[in-house]
Amino acid sequence: MTKKKCSYCGSTWNPEKDHIKAKSKGGKTTTNACQSCNRSKSNDSVLSWLRRLKKNKEYRWTRIKDYQKGKRNEIASKVRKVANEK
Ligand SMILES: [Zn+2]
């Protein structure tokens, strides 16, 4: 069995299903997210969560940024967008 990885930071620690778009906003697409990412993201959209991390949670933000480096997917493009914001 392949180990599931968190789609945000690449951690293999207890990945859970995360709704890319918060369930409360009609989100149906799911991805794997580790407990730390899932809990800190909560009901936020990916973009506003990443902005929050960049401001307040430097450690997690850096981990996610490093893991997404060079990747081509929706999450990676959002990470790049937020990384380029001032
Ligand atoms: Zn994670």
Image: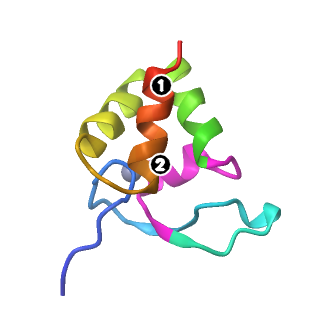
**Magenta stretch, residue numbers:** 31-45
Q: Amino acid at mark 1?
A: Lys
Instruction: Find residue 56 and report its image quarter.
Output: top right
Q: What residue did someone put label 1 on?
A: 57
Asked if residue 8 lies left or right of residue 47, the reply is left
Mark 2 closeness class: few <14, some 14–19, many ≥20 residues within 10 Å: many
- First in residue order: circle 2 vs circle 1: 2
The residue at 65%/50% (across/down) is: 42
**Which numbered marker is on residue 25?**
none
* Label 2 within 8 A of ligand 1 by Cβ: yes
Residue at (60%, 40%) from the top-left corner? Answer: 47
Q: Quadrant of the N terminus?
A: bottom left
- The amino acid at mark 2 is Cys
Disc 2 marks which residue?
Answer: 37
Magenta highlight on residue 43: yes
Within-10-Å neighbours for mark 1: few <14, some 14–19, many 20+ = few
Residue that appears at 36% across and 26% down: 59
| Among the 4 quarters of the image, the one containing residue 64 | top left
